[in-house]
Amino acid sequence: MREDSTMKRVIPVMVPMPADRPYSYAVPEGMCVEPGSILRVPLGPREVAGVAWDGDGEPVEAKKLREISQVFECPPLSLEMRRFIEWVASYTLSPPGLVARMALRAPAAFDPEPPVEGLRLTANRPDRMTTARERVLHYAADGQAWTRSGLSHAAGVSSTVIDGLVAQGVFERVELPPQPVVPVPDTEFGRPDLTPDQRFAAGRLREKAGADHFSVALLDGVTGSGKTEVYFEAVAAALDRGKQVLILLPEIALTQAFLDRFHDRFGAKPAEWHSDLAPRKRERVWRQVAEGQVRVVAGARSALFLPFRELGLIVVDEEHDPAYKQEDRVFYNARDMSVVRGRLGNFPVVLASATPSLESRVNADQGRYERIVLSARFADAALPELRAIDMRRSPPERGGFLSPVLIEAIGRTIERREQALLFLNRRGYAPLTLCRVCGHRFQCHNCSSWLVEHRFRRQLVCHHCGHNEPSPEACPECGTLDHLVPCGPGVERIAEEVDRHFPEARTIVLSSDLLGGVKRLRLELEAIAAGEADIVVGTQLVAKGHNFPSMTLVGVVDADLGLANGDPRAAERTFQLLSQVTGRAGRSGKKSTGLLQTYQPQHPVMQALISGDAETFYEREIVERERAGLPPFGRLASIIVSAATRQEAEGHARALRRAAPPANEIEILGPAEAPLALVAGRHRFRLLVHGTRRADIQAYLRRLLEAGERPRGSVRVQVDIDPQSFL
Ligand code: ADP
Ligand code: ZN
């Protein structure tokens, strides 16, 4: 705290802006502020919510010093949370204000929830008794206050019956405290019968989650081995210790099934947190997490920035999933930052996956994490038998993409009244459209990418910036009509091919661009699980976490698709995705098959999948990474320079390179034009910074950015530590 000449108390306040450090504000006489307090402060012409930070406010000229407007009636952000915000900012080279902003994403939640109106029985009796009125009185006789809707629901009467009783003075209005968004979970509710393997794993996790110190467990179990059941025991142990729990899921909007399973185990649902929540609901969850009423949150990566008051366990399910990486404003990996939060808060973290990331595997091999293995599927469910279809030997017929071998297998599957899934990670109908006469290719005006035809919507769509235009009939280049041809398949085109072969079958296409959004997707997924489809054609949406009991065939349309790009994790990613997709088959004990259409059946990824020998694959990949000094054996960061013109972007990128200070443990590659050279009208260049494990890559980047020119005009510089995408 600092006193200026007028003896006003001045404190630092973190405002939700890309500022490097907190700003100083004066505390008005009589205002009670402590570090972590959430405040309303003037900022330029507006007022914003900020957080009282630690330490002294920097001296400010008296006439520039502004006063805090208000302290919200809200629990302060904990010291642990403030340290976490600073840590994430420093690690990702982001302004701490922007990280703090992620923790303040529920503006209306800073004021207490308004009380709810309730009704309580008085001594008055109604003028006339009816059976409906009798039922209401029967329920309300316990003297408790009820909400109007709760009472009408319980008594099974319409709310007009209740209004009538209120009018006669039979009920009086009282204020109820705000309703909890979810009931408190009961750790004794649905205790499972674990198999001996599961019991052992659960015991290890319970021991970790029952203790107040930092540890990381890697729960490594094949798909269907019961990882969820097992980590629920860690959740129970943390709850029994009086702690709050966070479960991170990569695709929360689609995990209705997860919420139901949690309910089966704990008799109540967890609070959900993701971008699809209604704003009012979000605010109530935020508030009740801060106040401690919500004990368990299941959420997307941003849930990591919720203001828990007594967080004691984080579970990261499908920890290898690329969806944990945010690539917008603050570039962070929620899996890695969960481990950081556990370390700062001194509590355990559980990472679960059937195909752990190489980073986590190496951490386990080197003893930093404890690896807990579940090697068999639960009950009589067997893993699917995987085979490659060599597309050079059994090519599809002209104009098609499915090999006769796969088509035959689909036919046999639906004859047995079982389900088949065809997986292709490409939305739309065709990834490229060209004119057969002049060769014109339809490209996005804003991006260096082809426009993808979406035939159901009759549009050409850019998957990078969202630009869309009606599907044309004539070539804009040569004007010829009816000579535009789609090149390559998307899921819609595969569905069309399936329809040609199996016109009687019920075929569903599932991808994230379905009209009707998340609600529709949930319904479709439920319908599939209930056996209401014979053939499902889907993108990676169908790969994640779903349990389709009668699915016995999974066909991967293009197993090579992910291998071609220049990503150092291409093999790992393909292995993970295809293991997960094929893992959708055979969950209920029926014999099941996975077929991989590939032009490279000898590729180590295909071999690992077919043989089921993940160990050898991991060993090879680990050796490769170590040899190349790539993560986790070395450090990587990208610097992405973008600008309105190519010249500006390239110029700034080159200048940065020239300004790079020399360093022993660090090399800089580039600048090179990014593979996606143009996105949403911005030209992009990339530099790659590669360091040894010992290198302090953040310190180096800070020096480099310090030494280079400030970005001017339209130039923007974005740093991506531990990049996952190299596009
Ligand atoms: P994973 O997350 O490893 O893929 P799940 O936890 O989803 O596996 O379990 C697969 C299926 O087996 C689920 O339907 C689950 O309810 C069931 N299951 C697993 N273990 C048990 C158990 N001990 N008792 C009853 N059902 C179980
Ligand atoms: Zn575009």
Image (cartoon, rainbow, N blue to C red):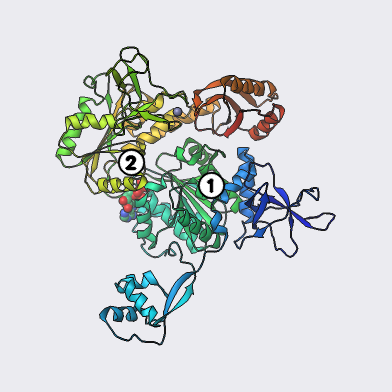
Tell me the residue at 69%/47% (across/down): 22
Query: Could you tell which of marks 2 and 1 lies nearer the N-terminus?
Result: 1
Amino acid tagged 1: Ser
Tell me the residue at 67%/51% (across/down): 42
Residue depth check, mark 2 versus mark 1: number of the one nearer the observer: 2
Which mark, by number, is residue 41? none
Instruction: Report crowding for label 1: few under 14, some 14 to 19, many 20 or more residues within 10 A (C-alpha).
Output: many
Tell me: residue 349, above or below residue 445. below
Drawn side of residue 247 relative to residue 343, left or right: left
Q: Position of residue 386 (x, y in %)?
A: 28, 33
To which residue does mark 2 refer? 515
Tell me: residue 43, above or below residue 425. below
Amino acid tagged 2: Leu
Instruction: Report crowding for label 2: few under 14, some 14 to 19, many 20 or more residues within 10 A (C-alpha).
Output: few
Quarter of the image with the N terminus in it: bottom right
To which residue does mark 1 refer? 338
Q: Position of residue 558 (x, y in %)?
A: 32, 27
